[in-house]
Image: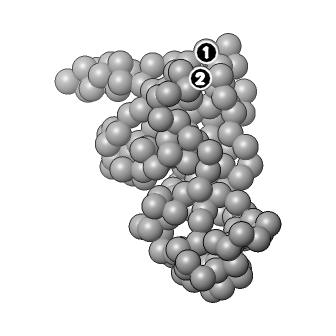
Amino acid sequence: MNDTDDSDRELRVSKIRNGTVIDHLAAGQALNVLALLGIDGSGGESVSVGMNVPSDKLAKKDIVKVEDRELSQSEVDVLSVISPEATINIIREYDVIEKKRIERPEAVTGVLSCPNRNCITNADEPVETRFVVLSDGLRCDYCGEIVREDEIATHLDVS
């Protein structure tokens, strides 16, 4: 019975030749990660997504595999706020050449919009958004508006 379960997992998440595997995402975050990466299918990227996949560590997890792309540090920073347990694996020629746990940064810049319409970042000023990372969300560095963890996906501002 266990052998069948293991082979089922392998079929759900096949290897990629080159790219990035984002593993140990909190269940339900895979689509937010795709939004963060600006992947909507129109760019022709090869992407594999596993949602609510059984996990020994998290009970259920999501996995995103993006071929021929490595994440920028700002993308990893926001990812750490969405899913702090995630790991990043860089794949080249089917082998993992780098595996790292993401760490929560002190701040994220330029990847979220501020929900406060009166914030200077929403005016026609050349000001990039900046949020201080809190234990349960983010605080706008300009106006103090708080964005809770469950609201982050709606304020992603990446392209």
Residue 67: give its label: 2
Q: Is residue 151 left or right of residue 108?
A: left
Secondary structure of the residue carrying tag 2 is strand
Residue 41, how many percent across, how many down? 47, 28
Q: Farthest right residue?
A: 126
* Among the 4 quarters of the image, the one containing residue 96: top right
Q: In this view, does 49 lie above or below 104?
A: above
Query: Residue 78 or 92: which is nearer the viewer?
Result: 78
**Taking 83 as reference, is 89 left or right?**
right
Judging depth in this view, the residue of 144 and 128 nearest the camera is 128
Q: Is there CB contact under 8 Å for labels 1 and 2?
A: yes
Foreground residue, 60 or 135? 135
Image quarter in which the N terminus is found: top left
Relative to 65, residue 134 above or below? below
Q: What residue type is labelled 1?
A: Arg
Badge 1 crowding class, 10 Å Cα cut-off, few under 14, some 14 to 19, many 20 or more, is few
Q: Quadrant of residue 131?
A: bottom right
Give the structural element (helix, strand or loop) at label 1.
Answer: loop
In the rendered image, the residue lying farthest to the front is 124
Q: Where is residue 102 in the image (x, y as percent from the top left)?
A: 65, 52
**Picture disc at residue 17:** 1
